Image: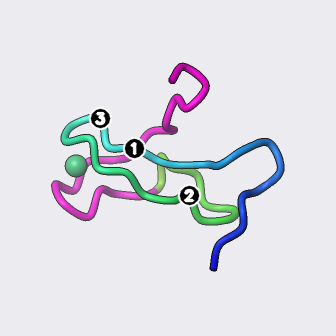
Amino acid sequence: MLRPLPGGPKECICPMCGERVLEARGIPCRSKKCPKCGSYLIKSPLKRF
Ligand SMILES: [Zn+2]
């Protein structure tokens, strides 16, 4: 079970299709690809919600 990291939950989100992926430790979103469409992920702007 994953625990939320200090500073709040971290997610990567696909700007193309909206797929959300939990950010792996030490791996920036921009270096990961969406499992659905293959686009590079960006950080989810959780603070805006
Ligand atoms: Zn996608």
The one nearer the camera, 26 or 10, is 10
Dot 1 alpha-carbon crowd within 10 angstroms: few under 14, some 14 to 19, many 20 or more: many
Tag 1 and tag 3, C-beta contact below 8 Å: yes
Could you give the CA–CA distance between mark 1 and mark 3, rounded to whole angstroms? 6 Å
* Quadrant of the frame with the N terminus: bottom right
In the image, is the residue at mark 3 within 8 Å of ligand 1 by its beta carbon? yes
Name the residue type under label 3: Pro
Residue drawn at (51%, 24%), measured in percent from left and top?
49
Mark nearer the N terminus (1 vs 2): 1
Tag 1 and tag 2, C-beta contact below 8 Å: no
Q: Is residue 41 magenta?
A: yes
Tag 3 and tag 2, C-beta contact below 8 Å: no
Label 1 belongs to which residue?
A: 13
Residue 28 image label = none
Q: How was this image coloured?
A: rainbow
Identify the magenta region: 32-49
Label 2 belongs to which residue?
A: 23
